[in-house]
Amino acid sequence: MTVRAYIGLGSNLDAPDAQLRCALQALDRVESTRLVASSALYGSDSLLAGQPRYTNAVAALDTGLEPLALLDALQKIENDQGRVRKERWGPRTLDLDLLLFGDRVIDVPRLKVPHYHLHARPFVLYPLAELVDADFVLADGRRLAQLLQDCPFVGLERL
Ligand code: ROI
């Protein structure tokens, strides 16, 4: 049995667009996992002043892995693509966030799903909306259409 999971991708160092394309291929190579679809790439300013602009996207996966095993695989891809964790929220070559994992709500120290900041981030919500039906409901009952309404498409550039 597989579960549909959604991954947020972000990069603002070392050719961000190429980092994301490379990460999408790596996601498709994760064991027991298939890349189903990916959104367009989006450009936006960093939420933190003084950082380079980000490129973001969202990917849909079908996976037979458990959530923490998938998280391990995401962190391995981040590390393989040269991510160095210098400071929390610092610029990064690759950030992979597990946004949604089927109908599961997960709240353990390592992993919160649906992703904690998803509702406030247009660079997550709008790419996600490309990959799901208009009436999509998150595992915690929130409607994507409502989240989009509350989070305007501001500062996003569809690349
Ligand atoms: N800003 C944008 N635009 N995209 C990101 O992926 C992103 N990630 C972050 C912070 C620093 C919060 N800002 C971001 O971690």
Image (spheres, rainbow, N blue to C red):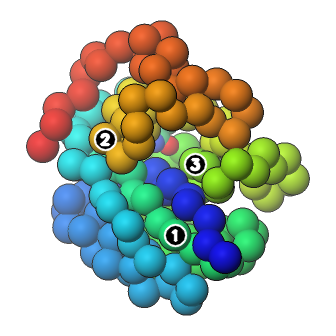
35 w.r.t. 57: above or below: below
Pick whichever of labels 1 and 3 is earlier in the sequence. Answer: 1
- Residue at disc 2, secondary structure: helix
Say what amino acid the circle numbered 3 marks: Leu
- Residue at disc 3, secondary structure: strand
| Residue appearing at x 48%, y 10% in the figure | 150
CA distance separating discs 2 and 3? 15 Å
Res 99 label:
3
| Residue appearing at x 57%, y 24% in the figure | 143
| Residue appearing at x 44%, y 77% in the figure | 34
Q: Residues within 10 Å of mark 1 (few under 14, many from 20)?
A: many
Q: Which residue, given by chain and number where applicable, does mark 1 sit on?
A: 62
- Residue at disc 1, secondary structure: strand
Say what amino acid the circle numbered 1 marks: Asp
Pick whichever of labels 2 and 3 is earlier in the sequence. Answer: 3
Q: Which residue, given by chain and number where applicable, does mark 2 sit on?
A: 130
- List x then y, in percent, for residue 129: 37, 36
Quarter of the image where one finds residue 92: bottom left
Quarter of the image that includes the C terminus: top left
Q: How many marks?
A: 3
Q: Residues within 10 Å of mark 3 (few under 14, many from 20)?
A: many
Residue 12 visible (yes or no) = no
